[in-house]
Image (cartoon, grey):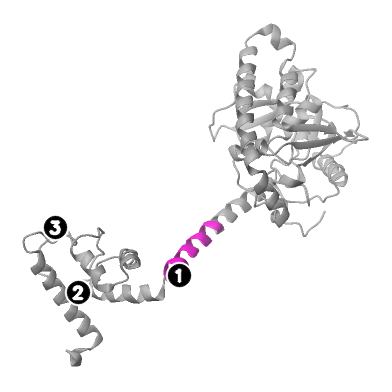
Amino acid sequence: MNPNIVVENLVEKSRFPKTVNETLGIIAYFPFGVILVILRVFIAINALFLTIILSNYPNIRRVNFHRPLLKTMSSVLGLIVVKKENSSSKKSRVLVSNYLSLFDHIALHLATGCFTYIFVSTSQPTTLFSTPVALYFGMISTLINDNVTTETSILKQFLVRNNKQSLMLFPEGASTNGKYALLKFSIVPALISDKLQPVVLTVTRPSFVNINLSVLGSNNISEVFWFFFVPFTKFEYKLLEVIQRSNDESDEALMSRMEKAISQELNISTSNITKNDKEEYKKKYFLELAKNAKNHNVTLENFEEDPEILRMAAQVTDVLPYVPKNVIVANLKRTRCVDITITNILDGTIKFTPLPQSSKEPKTTTKRTEPNNFGVGSFMERKTKLIDEARKRYIKKHGLHHLV
């Protein structure tokens, strides 16, 4: 176990590579990728409809039709599953794998026939997949209470009810980039079986579109889009020898041996970082991004304006203090003239919401319904009066009486 590993090492924050050559490759490929996405979405939708329709016929259901169909569709959609050399045969009904992406369970379902339970908390209601669609993807969706006991009992019941079926579990609970370390395994697999088989999974994409498989905070739609975008995604798996619980071995010790077996095969480390640690890091990371974006906007507003524009805006503000600065600046960028901007404001050409005036500011005796609407009949008189009052305030503020 490497104590220097932190959550940041285990996640990707950007979808795209950092090297110039790889970025240029993606740019050149982009039009072809978009065409692939459109075609593959159409194919996937039709395949799903076919699955739902055929699932209503019991005779077809009994022949387990969905796996051949899924294999065909997956190949077309670019999901390639390859068995590594020296892989053991499947010898356990409970298999445990590292977790890299949204599509891991599909690849391993195609390779091993195992099903993956998707547990949805009752405290966070959501629309579950219908049974045919879930089975099509090698999943079984189930609502549970927020406790391990309920989850464990459901998994045990599945093994009892389905003698010929097996389970694929991902005890990390959240995906990683697979480069440095595993997340700490939960003890759930050890609670349902004393005989566990490790599965080592690696995923690669073509070098010219080396788009990261999973990104911190990305949603499922984004994952599917980029999966369809690349020409193919290759999932390579290897079954290791079954790990049997020894006498008086605790659940934690058994899962620790599972972690070591998978991490050694991947040539990475184990860690004490949990899925909850990753979730906390994600929250802090996006809060920090939001804070930095806010500060950046303030910086741009205050310091990136043309100094000449800011100087003229200050002159207009001295004359018309109730006008928001952003309104003044926007008009000055077009007119480049203090007098024209003041005229535009006073004659109602510029619409704005006036700022609240200080109680110390002298109030005009002119009654109006809107600050920037001065009537029609006496417009010139009102305009002249306001400019004269503003001029007097400006002279008094800057001590320019000797120049009058």
Towards the viewer: 68 or 230: 230
Q: Report the magenta residues as a range.
A: 289-303
Q: CA distance from mark 3 to mark 2?
A: 19 Å
The disc placed on residue 361 is 2
Q: Position of residue 369 (x, y in %)?
A: 14, 57
Q: Position of residue 91 (x, y in %)?
A: 88, 26
Residue shown at the point (76%, 39%) measured from the top left: 187
Q: Position of residue 99 (x, y in %)?
A: 74, 40
Q: Quadrant of residue 86?
A: top right
Q: Quadrant of residue 246?
A: top right
Residue 211, placed above or below residue 393: above
Towards the viewer: 164 or 51: 51
- Where is mark 1, residue-wise? 304
Q: Could you tell which of marks 3 and 2 lies nearer the N-terminus?
A: 2
Residue 357, placed above or below residue 233: below
* Residue type indicated by callout 1: Glu
Q: Can you tell which of label 1 and label 3 is closer to the viewer?
A: 1
* Residue type indicated by callout 3: Thr
